[in-house]
Amino acid sequence: MRKPIVWALAFVVLGTVLAACGTPPPLKSAKYLQDNSLLQQDPKGPRVFHGITVGQTTFTDALSKLKADPAFSNVQSQDKPPSAAFSTKDGEACCQLSANDSGIVNALLVKVTPSITAGDVIKTFGNPQYVNSVDYTDKEVAMALIYPDLGIVTWVSPGDATSKLDATSPVVMVLYLDPKDWHSVLDTATLQGWNGFLPYSTYKNATPVVTPRVTVTPGGQ
């Protein structure tokens, strides 16, 4: 059976969303979820989003919370593997979550309006340990600031491939993970080490400090 956590990691950390057919949705949009709760996260505590605690809340309870929350609409779910997708109250697809084999939420992805920045994230949580760089379109690139011990990945979009990551680069996606599952990331991801605010191309061409130890087969079997 395909592991739910692999679904979440493949979707974001490994960037397979970027390989989807057709024109991808923009990284920056005022239609995504207006949510700055990332900056209110307790670095020493679990990740919490609208009452859903990653690593603690059951999938069933998470669905109930989402369906009762006026901030969301169009909650769609499946049981095998446990996963759900939902939209903003205005119907814009924004968010996904998955649960493990025990039915506990272990990953939650949120596409947010570009109202917080890389500088805000680093001021709150310190420097990330890893960076991941992905060509999204010819007009937008994505860079992940990765905090394994905190279970946080923030994707920022500094501009196109000629741009530079700096303190004003807007956050466009937030991924919360159960830190206990980070071995799955390190087994399958290619990551660069954090080296400060640098041009996108510098990180893109940097020698990885983490390379895949496990090959993910199609379908995540």
Image: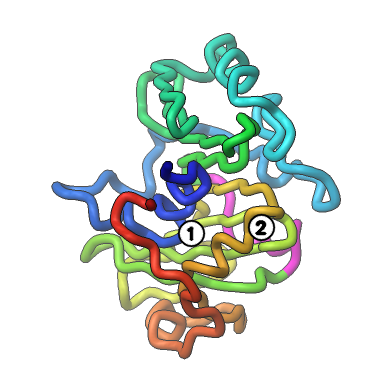
**Mark pair 1, 2: CA separation:** 10 Å
Quarter residue 182 falls in = bottom right
Q: Can you give x and y, in whole percent of width and height, for residue 129 in the image?
A: 66, 73
Q: Is residue 221 above or below residue 95?
A: below
* Residue 122 within the magenta-colored segment of the rendering: yes
Q: Residue at x 45, y 88 (%)?
A: 206
Q: Which residue is mark 2?
A: 121
Proximity of marks 1 and 2: CB atoms separated by less than 8 Å: yes
Q: Can you give x and y, in whole percent of width and height, for residue 71 in the image?
A: 54, 19
Identified by mark 1, the residue type is Val
Of the numbered discs 1 and 2, the one sitting upstream in the chain is 2
Provide the residue span drawn in magenta. 115-126
Q: Which residue is mark 1?
A: 156
* Residue 172 within the magenta-colored segment of the rendering: no
Identified by mark 2, the residue type is Val
Q: Can you give x and y, in whole percent of width and height, for residue 59 in the image?
A: 59, 25
Tell me the SS state at disc 2.
Answer: helix
